[in-house]
Image (cartoon, rainbow, N blue to C red):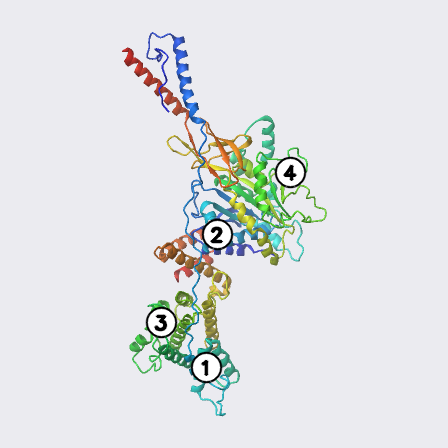
Amino acid sequence: RGGRSGTELRKALVSVWLQCPSITRIYTVGESFEGRELLVLEMSDNPGTHEAGEPEFKYIGNMHGNEAVGRELIVYLAQYLCNQYQQGNESIIDLIHTTRIHLMPSMNPDGFEKAASQSGELKDWFVGRSNAQGVDLNRNFPDLDRIVYGNEKEGGANNHLLNNMKKAVDENTKLAPETKAVIRWIMEIPFVLSANLHGGDVVANYPYDETRSGSTHEYSASPDDVIFKSLAKSYSQFNPVMSDPQRAPCRKNDDDTSFTDGITNGGAWYSVPGGMQDFNYLSSNCFEITLELSCDKFPAEDTLKTYWEENRNSLVNYIEQVHRGVKGFVRDLQGGAIFNASISVEGIDHDITTAKDGDYWRLLAAGNYKVSAYAPGYLTVIKKVAVPYSPAIRVDFELESLVERKEEEKEELMDWWKMMSETLNF
Amino acid sequence: KSARPNPPGPTLFSCKVKEAEPEQENDDFTLLKSLAEGQRSKETNETPVRESLEKEPYFPDESDSTKNRRLVEDYDSTKMENGKYQDDPESFRQVDGTPLTAEDIVQKIATKIYEEDDRGVFDRIVSKLLRLGLITDSQADSLEYEVAEALQDLITKNAKNNEIEDLGEDYPVTRGDQDDQNPDAKGEEEERKDGLQDLQYFPNFYRLLKSLDSEQDAQERETLITIMKTLIDFVKMMVKYGTITPEEGVSYLENLDAMIALQTKNKLGKTLGIPGIIPPTGKTPEDDDNTKAEAAKMQKEYENLKDSTKEEAPSTETRDHPGKSEIYLEAIRKNIEWLKKHNKDEGKDDYDLSKLRDFMDQQVDSYIDKGIIEKGEGETIKRIYGSL
């Protein structure tokens, strides 16, 4: 069967780190139910730190333990990036210097072990899918879709809908340890773009996954439908199988009517509540899509090379998508960073927020936009921007605080009073 | 930003003035305020100039400069002269049917090795001899020693006649093995000095030799020296014929010394290690370096031969995880190679190995703490770095 064991996975990651220690770092976001580390290999020119203005990216594989292709491809990708970097590949060097890339080959190592230990050619379609507790991790995330759909009708926030981390996550007994670990990870690092890797079909799936009406199939567009389609296509177009319009469905009776150009809206394909993809978009600034990479969930070892060839260009090109839209800094008049300022785009009902250095990255398709920056206690600033397909346009904001404004007004009045009193000899 | 508003008339702060009418005062204050706001709103509707993406400087082109391979311009025609035997070099009789003397055999083998640039010749012949029961194991050992000597002579002879490319100042041409011929003739110290002069550039090998100072070790010492010198000469030959560049030759020999250190450490410093960690022999797209393949082959063959004559305790670490150590070693080697090349390209000083080692040790400890790698793995990695 195809795929490294847990120890071999770790060995592969450690080898990449040993070969490229100046641009890599291994860390763990937590443990699985059975105590396996959820390992991440990060790649950047300054591993271990967020550099102001540098966007963060992640790939997560194997959240369904029996969907193994993503797991292997992520390891191949790590090796590829390291080798290419050392061989002087300029675009890879540039990518690593301007992005912080996080690679998690397996979010469900317990499930993988179970799936891998099955004997015989044909693996059960479901064994190893869920974690060791029997939880399907891609149905386990807090359902924020329901909340946003409610807010759409009745008014309310359009972003960062996970309130009360303590209650919703830390003390939530329904959440698997793997889910909790990933949620904390998402909250801690200001991810901008992400993809989670699956198997069982071949398509790039984008939000929303859960249908608005609750029906099983219904196109459920997010406010960022335009850029999401563009992002999904940026992956599928380089994968010859995914983008093949003549491709037969994986199984005879599969319904792939929602697939066009190798992409599909989640809800249009089939409704998924509690998924990680939508959770990213609705709880944080991260835009995530779901990549289905193989008809066969756990194919034989000798097919992995082919899957790598099919996906290599897509995998690299998708990371590069993080450098699109508008990006910059929101600062106060003294040049200090304003953390958690909101960046709003007219016509798109989804705001993003600035990270701790006041830095933000707003993915946008090409077009003309009015972008505004707002923070409580400050006066909103609006700017018009013409955004190309790529690269990202730099737009910085200097916000004046209300207090400052008041002080200024007071000062103006004082000056005037002084002048008047001098003139009139008060 | 702080342009003074035009005062419409005598307007006053309520707190300052006693006489002003409250109504008028409020109106004026509002007016002032709106004037101020008017100023401000003009300033916010700016259309920003499109700024280009702030690009971080990155390294200039690091693509591999083509490894210059010299043409085999100076093909050594004297080789032909020395190696001309009309009979089959691998048979054991002279043309006229008289059996070969031991010395003849040694010469023939040495010549064949020299001509074919292939130490495998020796092994093929010796295994044949052993199979036929013509020689014993210990005789095979002596034979090896003598063939090495003869080979040395051949090389030296030819080196004198042709220009041999120096590998740089570090590796002077060996001046034959007059020192090794009679190990008992000279005093110990003198002998050591002479025999080991060329090997001073291999600190780890040198140390290993020094540790073999007992009577029983004498034979082994000599053999090791001979083998090492033979290897050096092979490398020189390959450089001479343009098979590898001088840099590659030097790099290979440096790696060899490092390998010896590693093996020596594994064996607690006394005997030369068994194959557990050998330089990677497979060709990867990255390194077209066939010297490593050659060296590994030679080393393996040497060690195979050694195995039959000596009992050695296997290193448990390498027994249990031969794959892992190899893979890690290969990865570390690639990093060091890249660092060397990268710093050279940048015009920087050579990378600081001790700093790198300290950093990696620290990281390894941290990773062990966090459960990212196992203690054994960590030890392996530290050991590899320690031996560099």
* Residue A142 visible in the picture: no
For the residue pair A40 and A219, the one nearer the viewer reads as A219
Which chain does the numbered disc 4 sit on? A
Amino acid carrying label 2: it is Ile
Q: Are marks 2 and 3 on the same chain?
A: yes
Which chain does the numbered disc 1 sit on? B
Q: Which of marks 1 and 3 is nearer the N terminus?
A: 1
Q: Are marks 1 and 2 on the same chain?
A: yes
- Mark nearest the camera among 1 and 3 is 1
Q: Do the residues labelled 2 and 4 touch (CB within 8 Å)?
A: no
Q: How far apart are marks 2 and 4 (CA)?
A: 38 Å
Q: Residue B233: image x %, image y %?
A: 40, 74
Amino acid carrying label 3: it is Ser
The residue tagged 3 is: B211
Quadrant of the rendering where the N terminus of chain A is positioned: bottom right
Quarter-of-image position of residue B364: bottom left
Is A414 positioned to the left or the right of A187 in the image? left
Q: Residue at x 66, y 33 (%)?
A: A213
The residue tagged 4 is: A267
Q: Residue B293: image x %, image y %?
A: 48, 68
Q: Distance between the residues labelled 1 and 3?
A: 31 Å
Amino acid carrying label 1: it is Ile
- Mark nearest the camera among 2 and 4 is 4
Q: Earlier in the sequence, mark 2 or mark 3?
A: 3
Circle 1 SS class: helix
